Amino acid sequence: MAKSTPSPIVTAPALDDAALDDAAGAEHASHGYISNKDDYLKRLRRIEGQARGLQNMVADEKYCIDILTQVSAMTSALESVALGLLNEHLTHCVAEAVRSGGDTADAKIKEASDAIARLVRS
Amino acid sequence: MAKSTPSPIVTAPALDDAALDDAAGAEHASHGYISNKDDYLKRLRRIEGQARGLQNMVADEKYCIDILTQVSAMTSALESVALGLLNEHLTHCVAEAVRSGGDTADAKIKEASDAIARLVRS
Amino acid sequence: MAKSTPSPIVTAPALDDAALDDAAGAEHASHGYISNKDDYLKRLRRIEGQARGLQNMVADEKYCIDILTQVSAMTSALESVALGLLNEHLTHCVAEAVRSGGDTADAKIKEASDAIARLVRS
Amino acid sequence: MAKSTPSPIVTAPALDDAALDDAAGAEHASHGYISNKDDYLKRLRRIEGQARGLQNMVADEKYCIDILTQVSAMTSALESVALGLLNEHLTHCVAEAVRSGGDTADAKIKEASDAIARLVRS
């Protein structure tokens, strides 16, 4: 479960000391997917199974098009995991950085935008 | 294909604080791409030119593969515009909603995540 | 509108006489999208209109997310044109090269695969 | 993340004619990736390893952006496998159907085009 950090809505440009201390104590506070960890693990295990299934299909020399269909399904499943993680990241990590204000917020948004670009282009 | 614009198309720089303050009073304060409007208009005019170029290629019955190469270039240009706009949207509109707090922030992030999903899947 | 240019279709070394005769009557045999030319032109004009619409949206400072939705729609329309052209290319140009045999066939397939890779990655 | 395989993953080379002749007598003659089977299996095992690595990252609550970077890498690796398989399929299976002529050729090309569309859109 993600800890609900008591971050005040401080729109000040710089992190105050209290906010910094809070962040330091909640080690994984900003990793917002924690509450859904089991769900993500389940989906990734299924994706791992798909990768194994593809190996069997190739080993058994199944029909190419059927293999490609499985690859497309696996790619979609991966994309869906990525979009879910990204949404959690925006909701928790980025939003928290914005509330803290300052350069951290801009850096977090830039970092998220770069990750989005990689997803769109991959 | 594209019109010969004298200046190269560059990635949109972020608004500086002064520009933000100016925008704060304006009607469309949350539409963060304003300071780069000319850049986006230039890029979109170039994309429009690519669409016209493709029509000429089809009308002249150019080689299919050459047409496909142009389509890929145009798709990349469009994606690049989308990623730029999205980055501005996160930097300004979403960040502002987060600073304001409340349900609006969550709604804005959800809306942005949905737009990202459409981009990744299109 | 540009008229059909009388570009001679000179195909590969090993065409048999019957195939040659067939090709001679079909002036643009290898550019397989001809029969649908008007359809492709119509779709590309619509895409050009979308590019113009996007410029208006940016000029009027419409809401970012609405612009992104239009970009996604335009990207999908472009992709659809590309997939249609590719299908025609495989059906006509590549298939003809394969029937002619020899190195041309392999080269055509390699060229098509490269175009597919660009589409998948763009 | 991926297993350390001693040899690098290379793009699948095309079958030479001798290999094709050999394959012609075999049960799965039309499944053109056979000569590269070990290469594909190696790449898919590496992808399976990436899926396992992602589970560890989520279980250990690694930073979201780092996980997303790995997802993008895995998606690219999968896409690359798909493009390789597709190229082999066109080179062998589809080309063979075209040489045989008749409705089978058209059906094979339609089937390949549909698989390409799924790849482009996934």
Image: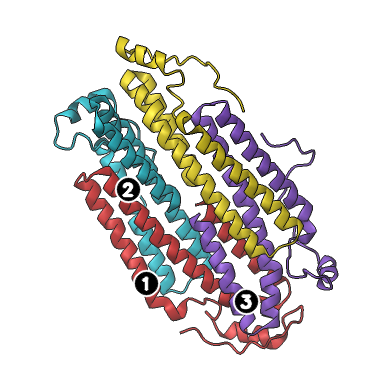
Chain colours: A red, B purple, C yellow, D cyan
Q: Which residue is mark 1?
A: A41
In terms of sequence position, does the residue under pointer 3 or pointer 2 come before the other? 2
What is the chain letter for disc 2? A
Q: Which residue is mark 2?
A: A68
Residue C78 lies, in percent from the top left, at: 54, 45
When the figure is inspected, residue B122 is found, relative to residue A27, above or below; the finding is above
Q: Quadrant of residue C60?
A: bottom right
Callout 1 secondary element? helix
When the figure is inspected, residue C100 is found, relative to residue A15, above or below; the finding is above
Residue pictured at 39% horizontal, 20% vertical: C104
Q: Which residue is mark 3?
A: A95
Residue B84 lies, in percent from the top left, at: 66, 56
Callout 3 secondary element? helix
- Same chain? Circles 3 and 2: yes
Number of other residues with Cα within 10 Å of mark 1, as a class: few under 14, some 14 to 19, many 20 or more:
some
Q: Tell me the distance, in whole angstroms, between the alpha carbons under discs 3 and 2.
A: 39 Å
> For the residues carrying marks 3 and 2, which lies nearer the camera in this image?
2
Residue A38 lies, in percent from the top left, at: 37, 77
Number of other residues with Cα within 10 Å of mark 2, as a class: few under 14, some 14 to 19, many 20 or more:
many
What is the chain letter for disc 1? A
What is the chain letter for disc 3? A
> For the residues carrying marks 1 and 3, which lies nearer the camera in this image?
3
Q: Amino acid at mark 1?
A: Leu
In terms of sequence position, does the residue under pointer 1 or pointer 2 come before the other? 1
Q: Amino acid at mark 2?
A: Leu
In depth, the one of A69 and C42 nearer the eye is C42
Residue pictured at 71% horizontal, 86% vertical: A17
